Image (cartoon, coloured by chain):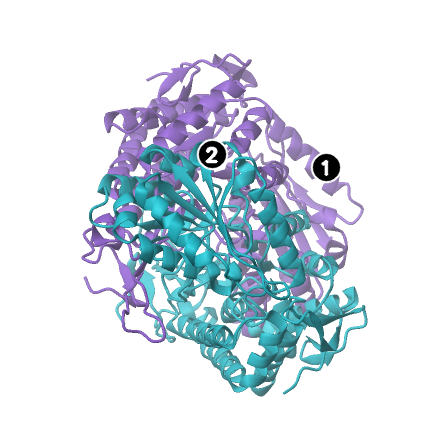
Chain colours: A purple, B cyan
Amino acid sequence: MSVQGNMFIGGRAVHGTNGRIQGFDPKINEKLEPSFGLATCEDADEACVLAAGAFQLFRKTSASQRADLLRLIADNIMALGDTLIERGMKETGLPAARLEGERARTANQLRLFADVIQDGSWQDVRIDTALPDRQPLPRPFLGVRKIPLGPVVVFGSSNFPLAFSVAGGDTASALAAGCPVIVKGHSAHPGVSELIGRCIVDALAELNFHPGTFSLVFGSGNEIGQHLVSHPEIKAVGFTGSQSGGTALMSLAQQREEPIPVYAEMSSINPVVFMPASLAAQTASLAEQFYASLMMGAGQFCTNPGLVIALKSDALTHFKQHMSKLMEGNCAGSMLTPSIFSSYCENKSALINSPEVNLITQGHSEGHNACEPAFVEVEASDFIKDRALHREVFGSFSMLVVCNSEQEALDVLGSLEGQLTGTIHYSENDDQTFAQQLIDTMELKVGRILFNGFPTGVEVSTAMVHGGPYPSTSNSQTTSVGSMAIERFVRPVCYQNVPNTLLPPEIKPNNPLSIPRHIDGEPEKR
Amino acid sequence: MSVQGNMFIGGRAVHGTNGRIQGFDPKINEKLEPSFGLATCEDADEACVLAAGAFQLFRKTSASQRADLLRLIADNIMALGDTLIERGMKETGLPAARLEGERARTANQLRLFADVIQDGSWQDVRIDTALPDRQPLPRPFLGVRKIPLGPVVVFGSSNFPLAFSVAGGDTASALAAGCPVIVKGHSAHPGVSELIGRCIVDALAELNFHPGTFSLVFGSGNEIGQHLVSHPEIKAVGFTGSQSGGTALMSLAQQREEPIPVYAEMSSINPVVFMPASLAAQTASLAEQFYASLMMGAGQFCTNPGLVIALKSDALTHFKQHMSKLMEGNCAGSMLTPSIFSSYCENKSALINSPEVNLITQGHSEGHNACEPAFVEVEASDFIKDRALHREVFGSFSMLVVCNSEQEALDVLGSLEGQLTGTIHYSENDDQTFAQQLIDTMELKVGRILFNGFPTGVEVSTAMVHGGPYPSTSNSQTTSVGSMAIERFVRPVCYQNVPNTLLPPEIKPNNPLSIPRHIDGEPEKR
């Protein structure tokens, strides 16, 4: 399979006619062949209408049928072999090992959702049995299951060309739920997008699904994305990207005649607290681990540790010295695109040039679009006062907030906007009451609290929350990673006194699908 | 206990100073004593700040503590005895039996949520055990539980002075979740609101909860409600009322610096389909049941059967004749307020005077603010074309849509906006394929499908969905009635590698709360 420069509209490979883009190798600053044609609004409309038609069939497929589809997509992706990795390296500047790891994660994610829907507990089926003799009124039979919302638009992200893109977590969970998907492919990796899109199109064809179940379109600027989100057949949106992009979609989706949910994962600076004893006991090791987390992928992660909170101490002075030694002269590698690189430089400079900010250390920039990492510091009182210091710098940049007391550290946490993660480094010699206060404060600010690690690295599993209060996401009540992500794309429907022959199988009294259910509030014996 | 004309701000009885309102007896068209002082924005701010303070404690109370609170509120409401019913009859014009039934439902609803939180499965606790030896990377320990969002503003509805008002479903589910509540009391029943508010305030005091856990304010117009929804300490909104009111709150909540979820239950015309054999076999009985559902409470229900869909037939002609006989000369009783009555008259007239609409029958208006019921008909093709015919008329009004074919009936359903309920009257002699098509079409339009009954009467239980696609609610993924309603006010937080001593009890490995959990995707043995 090779890259042709095509989109897919309901199974049909299409070379768009609304201008063109090309992939770009950020390491050598050169465009990649071939060029990709961009979608017209008519192309987008066609994808939406096809998705609406496909939805009528797709929503009635069984969990096993959709599980087969997800597993075949995973197999097709793995079967692309080096073609995918090589194109990915060119389009992103990321090393092979990172892309191979991300590919495994993407395939496992598809297989996880296959398992999730076959298990059936995601439907949260509940039955209240009829009580015909109840006084003063009989109780009817009631059963509730989850049904898919309808066609979903997914915006591929720049920083995870596989795991948060064409067949990433949003697509996997939406397809698992029974929602057709239209992906707006990210222009930073059109070739990878086409290769992955082909895997989905082929899997749908092989298993005889309606071709409208999936489309992939490209567009420059915001026009096509906005057109898709505004289309009346679209019932939900998944997005991973900037706060400005996410909030624009949120507001567009609310202005529709029928408002729809937007699940946007946006910005986060991911506070990391070093508690005193923990920092003192392992200063050098923590500096090394923190440095590794900060430099990984040139810091282009939503979970990059962009904020460090610590009390003034000798250990903290040593930590800064270690960091300087580690970072000096080192480059974090080329960034994903020239525009991400220039934003990084601009945002970093603005912070470094703030009067309250001192530069602790910075690295070195080597080659095209290469991220010069930086670690800066600021006093807690200044940080709390100046919201401009809270902004995310997407890349290998982090800010140390130096606190004079435990209370000041809590106040710094309390001053933050919503975040995806919060990290605490703690040892048994640290004050447990302070640790508890840190957790209490973090709970109200983040979706995931982690101890003695770093926030980069997001497990795809049943208990993961990759979400958090606004503006880290648009909806703190959901996650975009892990099996709970499917809940974003379903809604409950209750069936009251529906005759047995007409009941959906999930709710039939004899439980023909043998799925976990609750009857009158108690787990059903199976 | 008697009605004093007070609000409650964090436990303190306050006579507002920002103008005044009085209760009003719609049956005799007279104001009721005493007058109620209205809240200033400063009063509202004080309630919000108190709620934020209370939240820090309330969110850490145990499920058993909050269950005790909910049960004591229920007991206090029952202990009001006739004082409540008598005041309610005056303020609403509703009969004693209806208010007694609603009181029982309200108390049972509070007790249901007490049971729900003590059971613990609402937290959907999931644990992924650590896999330290996994290759290429170890898996950390991950556990997720639900935490409350924060202070919630609840707007009492006019039509359920108890079950959807001060201590109604929104308040019960928010308190159950651990969220302090500020109720904006409905001006249609300030006396009932004060009596119920006092039950909550007293229960909080008796059980030593922070008084900021609950406030009740009154305000005229939209100022106080908007001020509350805009306050940065407020984290979610529950609303039952008109579409214009609900959408205004949705848009206000989205424009905040931190957007928050609005759970608004708005308008619905609740289609009822009579399938041919069912209608033919029991024409008179169906007319009687339909008439009873339509006339109940002067049709002032979100689930009022405002739309009937049937195929042209002799049975349908007989059905209309029966309806005429039943309705002629009868009055549906006084409506809740003069303004609901005048809206009813205005909206009914607009539809009756539409050129496509024929009046089948109408009743009689007798006394003050008394609802003159009406049943009208329209051709399916006209109904599909003219969206103005789809509007809700709040009261005992219903529109028959006459169809020439099964397909036309499906098209009528397909043309509707989102609805709370859809009803199908079906007998074994009806076409099962057509019944299945009706279900398939309804599933995409409603939150609850019911057979051989009428949509008024909403069971408060584990499987109920009182929700549906926009504009019946602002969020089709939730319900405002039944135990799932608690999910609106919580969000997941994941704990990764948190030491055992610092883990919340829900996630501690030994399951000290003995709640249902999933470990590595499987139900935990208990």
Q: Position of residue B389 (x, y in %)?
A: 53, 40
Residue B280 visible in rendering: yes
Q: Nearer the viewer, residue A201 or A22?
A: A201
Q: Can residue A109 be spotted in the picture?
A: no
Horizontal side of residue A301 vs B512, given as left or right? right
Callout 2 and callout 1 share a chain? no
Q: Residue B155, relative to residue B272: is it above or below? A: below
Residue B255 is labelled as: none
Query: Residue at left 70%, top 68%?
Result: B218
On the image, numbered disc 2 is attached to which residue? B384
Report helix, strand or loop for mark 2.
Answer: helix
- The quarter holding residue A498 reads bottom left
Label 1 crowd bin: few (<14), some (14–19), many (20+), radius 10 Å: few
| Residue occupied by mark 1 | A349
Query: Going by the image, does B523 lie left or right of B205?
Result: left
Q: Nearer the viewer, residue A29 or A8?
A: A8
Q: Chain of mark 2?
A: B
Which quadrant does the C terminus of chain B fall into? bottom left
Residue B131 falls in image quadrant? bottom left
Residue at (40%, 21%) from the top-left corner?
A: A8
Check the picture and name the quadrant holding the N terminus of chain B: bottom right
Residue A377 image offset from top left, x and y in percent: 70, 50
Identify the amino acid type marked 1: Ser
